[in-house]
Amino acid sequence: MLVSVIPIGNSRGIRIPKSILQQLNIEENLELEIHDKGILLKPVIKKPRENWEKAFKDMHNNGDDKIIIDDFDEQADFQWEW
């Protein structure tokens, strides 16, 4: 597919047809990589909670996983309003 490089402010860019964006589920961001004499654009796949397991293990190993809020049960003077 041949696309034109167009001016965008002080930069230049290309327009990606809507059908291609939909086909690849591209919403807002693309990952851009430079390979040899070309550019590779890849969709950013959002993975909720990605890398959380490693982050929690790192926190534990660093001693950063301590409770910082007291348990609610320990507030003897608190009374529920019904």
Image (spheres, rainbow, N blue to C red):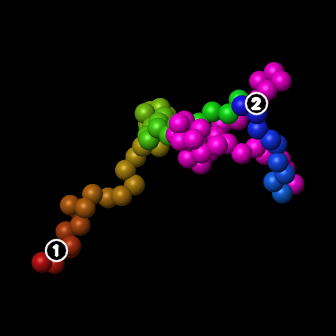
Residue 24, placed above or below residue 13: above
| Amino acid bearing label 1 | Trp
Q: Is residue 3 left or right of residue 66?
A: right
Q: Is residue 64 left or right of residue 34?
A: left
Q: Quadrant of the N terminus?
A: top right
Q: 38 or 75: which is nearer to us?
A: 38
Residue at image position (27%, 57%) is: 71
- Residue 63 on the magenta segment: no
- Residue 16 on the magenta segment: yes
Instruction: Report x, y in % for residue 31.
Output: 65, 37
Q: 37 or 68: which is nearer to us?
A: 37
Q: Quadrant of the C terminus?
A: bottom left
| Amino acid bearing label 2 | Ile
Question: How far apart in space, not on screen, are marks 2 and 1 (Cα)?
Answer: 61 Å
Residue 34 circle label: none
Instruction: Report x, y in % for residue 69.
Output: 36, 58
Q: Residue under label 2, please give it.
A: 39
Please tell me which of labels 2 and 1 falls first in the chain: 2
Instruction: Report x, y in % for residue 42.
Output: 63, 33
Q: Secondary structure at mark 2?
A: strand
> Mark 1 packing: few (<14 Cα in 10 Å), some, or many (20+)?
few
Range drawn in magenta: 10-39
Q: Secondary structure at mark 1?
A: loop
Q: Residue under label 1, please give it.
A: 80
User: In the rendered structure, are the residues bearing label 2 and label 1 in contact, judged by CB atoms less than 8 Å apart?
Assistant: no
Q: Is residue 82 left or right of residue 10?
A: left
Given the current orientation, which residue lies at the most extreme right position?
Answer: 10
Residue 55 visible within the image: no
